[in-house]
Image (spheres, helix red, strand yellow):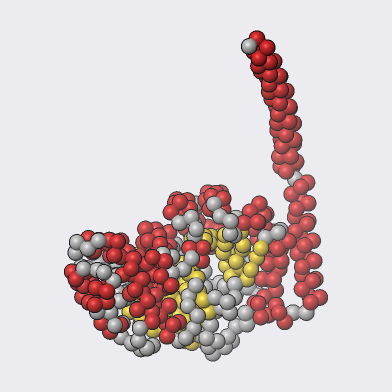
Amino acid sequence: TARTKTLFFPMPKRIRRQRPESFSFWDFPALLQFLDSLDVKRSHAPALLRTLASKLVTAGGANADCDTWEALGVIDETLLDLGLPRKACELLTRTKPFSTRLSSAMTSSDQSTCKMVLDLWDGHKVESVIMRHEDRTTICVSSQVGCQMGCTFCATGTLPIVGDLDAGEIVEQLLLAQRLEFQKGLAPVRNCVFMGMGEPLNNYDAVVSAVRSMTGLGQLGAYALPQSRVTISTVGVVPRMKQLVRDLPGLSLALSLHAPTQELREKIVPSAKHVSMEDLLSAMDLHLEQKTARAMIEYVLLSEENDSDLCATQLGKLLAPRARKIMVNLIPYNPTASGGFQAPKHQRVERFQQILAHFGIMTRVRREMGQDIAGACGQLALKESETAEDLEDFVQWRRRQPKNSKQMVSAECEALVAAALEVDAASPLTQEKRAKFRTWLQYSICATVTLSLALAVLARKQRGMAMAAIRAG
């Protein structure tokens, strides 16, 4: 077994105070207010942001000082060349390139993952993670210090909720990642997921403002992201889920479901006691109605808790009506996270995936990245982890399985799903629903025929009246 050395950072217990006079340059609403105070036109803001974002990412070497604009080559003449009045140069002395500081950046042994620990202006810390895939680079950002949702399987849920990040502190996580990747000569970040510390929809205004900046070509220029490549994950803050459809229609949504029934979900996700499964899926359906791309359902697999064939069958029945518009992301539990749970065996993950697949639901198993630096899903809790041995990823394991073994599992799961559907078809409740549907259908057909005949008679009468009028004329 792997031996793990864990080192915890102290978590200040005080609630975050309001910022002093300084502010994050990347907090767009705050920047506009500051320009107003200098009597500088707001129309200068986009060009200013684009230019300084480029300077921030590309200027200097990997260890270049980012404490002042001057260290990045931004001086008064830089702003004057953009057409800003001289009084706008006060901005360079009143703000810093970053209001946060990169405390450390730990890279996994396979170089696929980099966990950044950021010091905030008031002494608190948050983490964000850069994930390097073959075809894309994604950053997982935090939106709060701590979390109040208390999910039993998530290490962040063990931390007290200290406070919200402002929009600038969220945007700075993206810019720090872009700078880090540029200095290493790697591909730029092109995707962003709000799956770090905190519940994003509990910090709604700041998150929406940050997303608008992150996806605004007018603000970040070449380092902006398409809105469709930004995903917000939520445990289920229903009013905000509905509001998000209106405020950020191009955004992708990920629902952290983790259980197929209300009873089991309340056990795993304590905040589920305040929202029913029906209301949660209704809010998700509202999102699906507005989208052409698939939405994501996240499901952490916990050994002997929510990974059984029964749970998979219940989940399949629940999601099958939405199968064309969703994708289920199965996440094997990371044993070092929290809660005393165990990771499921690969064989259980395979059966769970196959059962959902035979319900017609697109299902993926999330690749485990950054376990050796405590940067994997559910592990962000401001700790360092040095693991002597990496656990084999499910995808790697399944590739090694013989073809006949895979076919056997698939056939077993297909038979299980078929049996479950037959039981549903034979149940009295289903038969009663079908009888009611037939009655409604017969009534609808009769009503439609009657209405059609009435309209035909009325049309014939109107034609006769029109012909009579023509002859009389």
**In the rendered image, which quarter is residue 419 located in?**
bottom right
- Work out whether residue 388 or residue 434 is closer to the camera in this orientation and state it: 434
Q: How many marks?
A: 0
Q: Position of residue 309 (x, y in %)?
A: 70, 63
Q: Position of residue 62 (x, y in %)?
A: 38, 88
**Residue 267 showing in the rendered view:** no
Q: Quadrant of residue 384?
A: bottom left
Q: Residue at x 43, y 73 (%)?
A: 223
User: Could you say which is closer to the camera, residue 424 or residue 217?
Assistant: 217
Q: Is residue 417 or residue 75 the one in the foreground?
A: 75
Figure check: 107 above or below 220:
below
- Residue 63: percent from left, percent from top: 35, 89
Q: Is residue 347 left or right of residue 12?
A: right
User: Along the line of sight, which residue is nearer the eye, 277 or 167?
Assistant: 167
Considering the image in quadrants, where does the N terminus appear?
bottom right
Let me know if residue 283 appears in the view. yes
Q: Is residue 320 above or below residue 337?
A: above
At x 72% / y 82%, what residue is drawn? 400
The residue at 53%/82% (across/down) is 112
Quadrant of the image occupied by residue 28: bottom left
The C terminus - image quarter = top right
For this orientation, the residue located farthest to the top is 472
Residue that extends furthest to the front in the rendered view of this protein = 473
